[in-house]
């Protein structure tokens, strides 16, 4: 791993890259749509305020000036719910703005943080700025109510206003808002999982919500629910540590998992836990390494000569690769940087960065969750795998959704890939065909399923599950039912982690036809070199510079096809390898091993 830049240096460089897009009225414009988007101006203000307060960057007057100008623009938009909302939904096909939703909920914490930060620095602000902040009606300006994660965001800002003496909100009222999160139901705090749950159970928004809860505690909140909040956060820390992949990213799980703000949020969350002492000694020691692990990924996404990428690739923003309909550079890039800025104010970067060897020396561990997530992760050294036994196919496939081989690398197999023309999400794994040759295949990772053996852990580091495969139903109940092809058969799946590789076994019980291994891979993430594919006798060797990943399959290979174009995932433009095995059978064993040049090449699987 090359030498990491200091967190403060990365923040300054990334914020400076946004300066050309800052308008005279104080609003930050998106570089593609040339308009304010959601909450970018507010988070840019906070980043500038942090730079203005830090030794080495605070001497530059532009940081104070930009923070004050953006603060004024943010307050004007936040205080006036009748004003047109900023752009929030985008069409990648025509590069157009298609929706404007009220996202003022998200401006409240950075607005208050910026105001307090500039005030503490003695910056001369508008005389009645405090009065204007006090006059904001949170129920009129903000869209969400508890237990929405949006409400958790504006509540963390509202506490700062309360602490400053500018808010009409009573402490008892604030505790009543928090009560709703603990009330149970489909949305709120799952104390057993340590997870904030909402529709789709996104790992990203669980992390996002807990980051704002930690902000509450860091800001001095000590209300009636504090003990319950601390208990929830301690459980959440353990889950976040378990769900962090070896490259620093968060395991895939529904929407937004591929945003760079998820990396920044980890840095902020893990750092705040250490400062507040929220967790066991072992958890807090692990949190230090986890914060740096996330940072080693975060630093990779500053575009050379451009703004910081809001997604975990460096392709041009006009390409929209890895973007979801609500993603734009103008808000998700400043959000990622704002989380980093908050971590810096809490002391992140003051200690010496761990070495790659330290980051990659994780003990062998496994976590398997039952309902409602059916998600798990296993780690051993520098190898991680994240598994979804029964994924929601809106964003994911079932099976090994993430496979990573250490910090500082870019040749990873993270998130499902999809053809640009549509079709199912694909992850590395078994597909079946009724005949030999280049005949149509059915990818089991895309099949609807009913678990017959829940996701469980294996000794050492490993995971397994069993599912009855279904086909989309056409009955009155609209459900799924067993049918022809792979449907109606049991799919048994397991993975074991070794020091440098994963070993996977899959069985489609009683399948009389032929087997194929499908392996989607990232070809172009926007930074040279691109990934190359070399065909070997029993699989393929992927190479990107000095990074290598070897895929091997057991059994005679009938035909091997490399499709270098036509797919994409959150990491970039993708290709697909299809390895057809000779002869019928119902079992497939395959392995994936990673190494770097100078390490002797991938170990035999």
Image: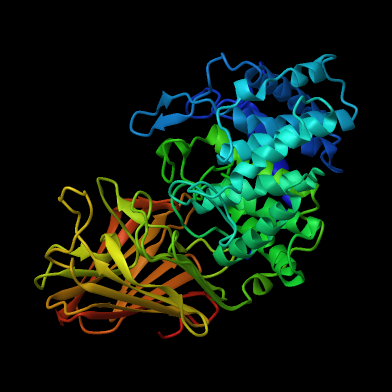
Residue 10 appears in the rendering: no
Left or right of 511, for residue 404: right
Query: At 81% across and 25% down in the image, what residue appears?
Result: 166
Left or right of residue 553: residue 497: right
User: Is 422 situated left or right of 455 in this image?
Assistant: left
In the rendering, at what x and y percent does residue 218 appear? 78, 47
Pick the front one: 2 or 214: 214
Going by the picture, which residue comes out furthest to the left? 435
Quadrant hosting residue 249:
bottom right
Task: Please tell me which residue is depicted at 13% across the width and 66% down the height of the picture.
Answer: 485
Q: Quadrant of the N terminus?
A: bottom right
**Quarter of the figure that contains the C terminus:** bottom left
**Left or right of 525 in this view: 107:** right
Q: Which of the two residues, 595 or 333, is positioned nearer the viewer here? A: 333
- Whether 297 is drawn above or below 466: the answer is above
Percent coordinates x, y for residue 391 in the rendering = 37, 58
Q: Name above or below for residue 224 compared with residue 357.
A: above
* Residue 439 on image: x %, y %: 11, 65
Write down the quadrant of residue 489 in the picture: bottom left
Q: Residue at x 48, y 54 (%)?
A: 528
Q: Nearer the viewer, residue 217 or 58?
A: 217
**Would you say residue 64 is visible in this rendering?**
yes
User: Picture quarter containing residue 431?
Assistant: bottom left
């Amino acid at each position: 791993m090359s030498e990491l830049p200091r967190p403060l240096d990365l923040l300054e460089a990334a914020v400076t890259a946004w300066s050309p897009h800052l308008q005279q009225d104080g609003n930050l414009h998106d570089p593609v749509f040339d308009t304010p988007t959601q909450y970018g101006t507010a988070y840019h203000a906070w980043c500038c305020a942090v730079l203005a307060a830090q030794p080495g960057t605070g001497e530059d007057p532009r940081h104070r000036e930009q923070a004050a100008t953006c603060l004024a623009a943010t307050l004007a938009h936040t205080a006036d719910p009748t004003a047109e909302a900023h752009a929030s939904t985008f069409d990648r096909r025509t590069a157009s703005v298609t929706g404007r939703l009220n996202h003022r909920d998200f401006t409240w914490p950075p607005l208050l943080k910026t105001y307090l930060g500039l005030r503490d620095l003695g910056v001369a602000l508008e005389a009645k700025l405090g009065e204007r902040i006090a006059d904001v009606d949170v129920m009129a300006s903000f869209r969400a109510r508890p237990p929405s994660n949006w409400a958790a965001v504006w509540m963390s800002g509202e506490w700062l206003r309360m602490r400053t003496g500018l808010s009409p909100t009573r402490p008892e009222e604030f505790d009543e808002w928090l009560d709703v999160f603990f009330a149970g139901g489909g949305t709120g705090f799952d104390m057993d999982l340590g997870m904030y749950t909402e529709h789709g159970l996104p790992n990203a928004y669980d992390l996002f919500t807990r980051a704002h809860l930690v902000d509450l505690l860091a800001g001095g909140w000590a209300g009636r629910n504090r003990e319950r909040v601390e208990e929830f956060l301690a459980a959440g820390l353990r889950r976040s540590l378990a769900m962090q992949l070896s490259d620093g990213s968060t395991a895939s799980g529904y929407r937004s998992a591929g945003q760079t703000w998820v990396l920044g949020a980890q840095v902020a969350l893990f750092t705040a836990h250490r400062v507040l002492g929220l967790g066991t000694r072992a958890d807090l020691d692990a949190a230090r390494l986890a914060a740096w692990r996330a940072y080693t990924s975060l630093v990779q996404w500053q575009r050379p000569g451009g703004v910081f990428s809001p997604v975990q690739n460096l392709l041009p923003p006009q390409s929209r690769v890895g973007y979801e309909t609500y993603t734009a550079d103008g808000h998700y890039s400043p959000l990622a940087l704002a989380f980093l800025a908050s971590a810096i104010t809490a002391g992140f970067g003051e200690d010496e960065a761990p070495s790659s060897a330290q980051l990659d020396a994780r003990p062998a561990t496994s976590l398997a969750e039952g309902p409602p997530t059916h998600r798990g992760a296993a780690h051993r050294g520098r190898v991680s795998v994240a598994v979804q036994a029964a994924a929601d196919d809106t964003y994911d496939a079932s099976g090994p959704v993430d496979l990573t081989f250490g910090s500082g690398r870019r040749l990873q197999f993270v998130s499902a890939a999809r053809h640009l023309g549509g079709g199912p999400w694909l992850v590395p794994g078994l597909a079946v065909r009724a005949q030999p040759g280049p005949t149509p295949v059915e990818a089991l990772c895309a099949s609807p399923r009913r678990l017959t053996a829940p996701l469980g852990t294996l000794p050492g580091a490993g995971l397994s599950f069993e599912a009855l495969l279904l086909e989309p139903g056409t009955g009155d109940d609209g459900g799924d039912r067993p049918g022809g092809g792979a449907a109606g058969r049991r799919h048994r799946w397991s993975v074991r982690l070794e020091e440098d590789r994963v070993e996977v076994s899959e069985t489609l019980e009683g399948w009389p036809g032929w087997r194929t291994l499908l392996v989607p891979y990232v070809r172009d993430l926007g930074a040279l070199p691109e990934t190359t594919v070399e065909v070997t006798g029993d699989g393929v060797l992927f190479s990107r510079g000095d990074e290598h990943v070897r895929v091997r399959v057991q059994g005679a290979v009938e035909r091997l096809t490399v499709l270098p174009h036509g797919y994409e995932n959150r990491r970039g433009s993708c290709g697909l390898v299809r390895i057809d095995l000779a002869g019928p059978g119902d079992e497939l064993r395959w392995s994936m091993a990673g190494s770097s040049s100078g390490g002797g090449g991938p170990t035999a699987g």
